């Protein structure tokens, strides 16, 4: 992926397809963080696809006292997998991209 100069609309372009998962740290209606992510999705350059995740409120808050090997009940489905297939798919895409990047020569 490379960044290109701004096009005639003044927006930057990206060569190659990029997917960005947008997760707001706030679950409050009218959140400035969520609004900023919505704006980010609107102004994303050509070649960048954004996916907004809005399931944060359904997940339990992080508590180090509860940290362990098991996932909280709210985070798993009846078959034992992560409940939100959109998040599962995005995580897989991110790992694929990371592994592909790590396989590239550095320099």
Image (cartoon, rainbow, N blue to C red):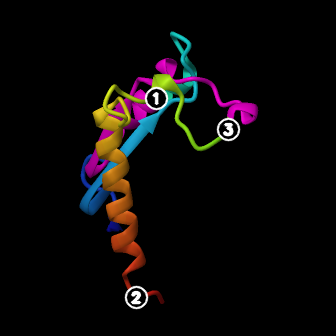
Q: Quadrant of residue 15?
A: bottom left
Which is nearer the eye, 64 or 101? 64
- Residue beneath disc 2: 105
In the rendered view, tell whether residue 47 sits above or below residue 41. below
The number of callouts visible is 3
- Which structural element holds mark 3? loop
- Which structural element holds mark 2? loop
Image x and y of residue 27, in percent: 54, 17
Q: Are marks 2 and 3 in contact (CB under 8 Å)?
A: no
Q: Which mark is residue 43?
A: none
Alpha-carbon neighbours of circle 1 within 10 Å: few (<14), some, or many (≥20)? some
Image x and y of residue 26, in percent: 57, 22
Q: Which of marks 1 and 3 is nearer the N terminus?
A: 3
Q: Do the residues labelled 1 and 3 touch (CB within 8 Å)?
A: no
The N terminus - image quarter: bottom left
- Which structural element holds mark 1? helix
- Given this view, does label 2 or label 1 mark the residue nearer the observer? 1
- Part of the protein shown in magenta: 37-66
User: Which residue is found at the position 47% from the left and 18% from the top?
Assistant: 58
Q: Earlier in the sequence, mark 2 or mark 3?
A: 3
Judge left or right: residue 76 versus residue 79: right
On whether residue 59 falls in the magenta region, the answer is: yes
Image x and y of residue 63, in percent: 71, 30
User: Which residue is found at the position 41% from the left and 30% from the top?
Assistant: 76
In the rendered view, tell whether residue 32 sits above or below residue 7. above
Q: Can residue 44 be seen in this view?
A: no
Query: What's the distance in space between the residues labelled 1 and 3, CA to CA?
Result: 13 Å
- Residue beneath disc 1: 75
Query: What's the distance in space between the residues labelled 2 and 1, CA to CA?
Result: 37 Å
Alpha-carbon neighbours of circle 2 within 10 Å: few (<14), some, or many (≥20)? few
Q: Residue 67 carries which label?
A: 3
- Given this view, does label 2 or label 3 mark the residue nearer the observer? 3
């Amino acid at each position: 992926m490379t960044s290109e100069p701004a096009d005639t609309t003044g927006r930057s372009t990206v060569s190659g397809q990029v997917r960005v998962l947008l997760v707001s740290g706030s679950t409050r209606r009218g959140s400035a963080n969520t609004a900023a992510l919505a704006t980010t999705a609107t102004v994303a350059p050509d070649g960048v696809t954004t996916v907004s995740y809005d399931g944060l409120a359904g997940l339990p808050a992080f508590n180090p006292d509860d940290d362990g090997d098991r996932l909280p009940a709210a985070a798993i489905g009846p078959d034992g997998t992560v409940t939100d297939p959109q998040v599962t798919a995005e995580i897989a895409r991110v790992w694929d991209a990371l592994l592909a990047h790590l396989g590239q020569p550095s320099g």
